[in-house]
Amino acid sequence: MRNQIDLLATVTVLGVLEQAYFALQVIYARRKYKISPPNTTGHPEFERIFRAQANCSEYFPIFISLLWVAGIFFHQGMAAACGLLYLYTRFKYFQGYTVATQGRLGPLYASARLLWLLLGLAVAGLLAHFLLPTPLRGWALA
Amino acid sequence: MRNQIDLLATVTVLGVLEQAYFALQVIYARRKYKISPPNTTGHPEFERIFRAQANCSEYFPIFISLLWVAGIFFHQGMAAACGLLYLYTRFKYFQGYTVATQGRLGPLYASARLLWLLLGLAVAGLLAHFLLPTPLRGWALA
Amino acid sequence: MRNQIDLLATVTVLGVLEQAYFALQVIYARRKYKISPPNTTGHPEFERIFRAQANCSEYFPIFISLLWVAGIFFHQGMAAACGLLYLYTRFKYFQGYTVATQGRLGPLYASARLLWLLLGLAVAGLLAHFLLPTPLRGWALA
């Protein structure tokens, strides 16, 4: 079983590390601008970093869900590769949003395209699973 | 392995699609009321849509966790059916909250009842797994 | 398959129950201080409880991801034990934050250390999986 999910698990752990990095940036921004919890406003840069991290956190479970369904029902390597690209676009999104609100848009659209791609792989894998006769399913399962 | 989780994976993908729909509604409301990120306030309807989406996002990982534990340890088809109903109540919740704060309550209670049901199935499945002798477990495993 | 994930599933269900408890505390605080949705401000104690619950919700998917990867690739029992301790530190965090902002810090650091430990177990398990020859992997897989 582990061989069928090892790449998915690796990308999941990398995704967690990325979230940890984002969370640390919020903590540093709180210190820099002296904005103590539970406050979430007080300086534009802090607010951008806070929203960037909140947005990435919100999409994390959606990303993990699609990664695993696409990886198990379509192709593990392809899902893991899309996952790595997604994490990269999220990093650029966070960096861009930190500098300016406009800076988040390009990477955000790129990350959305990768989620739609993972969704497409997941749907294709599930359709192959439900509709194709068992011997033909091999194409999608590597 | 895939046969034991194919319905759970399908409901997961449908749940992701629903979250995508909610996220799009927030974007449309931002445009309609000209509320640019990182702002999250400015017009009552926008704030209701924003909170509706935030609430659904917050419950998404909890829903997915219960769906999978109930589906693997109790009965996949029953868990998937509860999952579909949950997604439907969340859709009604989002629609209701968009119109008025009061409109969210009925569907919210219905969605909570379905989560408690999934939790009950998960606990029952785990208890059967840990307590029943192996041959008797079949009743819960379809 | 169920035997390899039964403890992870149990800790997951306990984690969901804890999140349900936190969500109920927010509802009670809304009633106590008469702060109706979609408002999220209005009284310091409500704001602390609201942020405590939001923070726990945000970390829930990260915790679940690490719990499962560590449990599947390193050692289920050890991951489940760390998971139980994590849920306990989150409970203390919530209680501490409810009373005073400073009260959240000790348990928050303890919960962060447990997440880093789970991350270490996950990475160790994945490295053993990818690098060790198959017969030697047994040490990590119980």
Image (spheres, coloured by chain):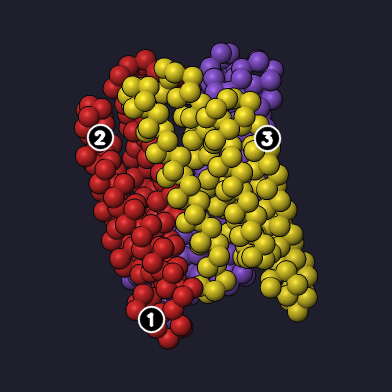
Chain colours: A yellow, B purple, C red
Task: Estimate the x, y position of residue B71 in percent, counting from the top left.
Answer: 52, 61
Q: Look at mark 1 in the image and give the residue it sits on.
A: C138
Q: Amino acid at mark 1?
A: Gly
Q: Amino acid at mark 3?
A: Gly
Label disc, if present, on residue C104 of the rendered structure = 2
Co-location on one chain, circles 3 and 1: no
Q: Secondary structure at mark 3?
A: helix
Give the vertical position of B99 relative to A136 (above or below).
Answer: above
Q: Does residue C139 show up?
A: yes
Give the vertical position of B65 relative to B137 (above or below).
Answer: above
Of all chains, the one bearing label 1 is C
Label disc, if present, on residue A106 of the rendered structure = 3
> Could you tell me how far apart the alpha carbons at marks 3 and 1 are, in whole angstroms?
46 Å
Residue at left offset 61%, top offset 31%: A104
Q: Secondary structure at mark 2?
A: helix
Task: Estimate the x, y position of residue B53 in percent, counting from the top left.
Answer: 56, 32
Residue at left offset 54%, top offset 36%: A94
Image position of C97 (left or right of B97): left
Task: Estimate the x, y position of residue C24 in percent, counting from the top left.
Answer: 36, 34
Of circles 3 and 1, the one toward us is 3
> Could you tell me how far apart the alpha carbons at marks 2 and 1 are, in whole angstroms?
40 Å
Residue at left offset 34%, top offset 37%: C22
Of all chains, the one bearing label 3 is A
Give the vertical position of A66 relative to C102 (above or below).
Answer: below
Q: Are marks 3 and 2 in contact (CB under 8 Å)?
A: no
Image position of C37 (left or right of A118): left
How packed mark 3 is, by other alpha carbons closer than 10 Å (few <14, some 14-19, many 20 or more), is few
* Sequence-first disc among 2 and 1: 2
Q: Are marks 3 and 1 in contact (CB under 8 Å)?
A: no
Q: Quadrant of residue A100 in the image? A: top right
Image position of A23 (left or right of A103): left
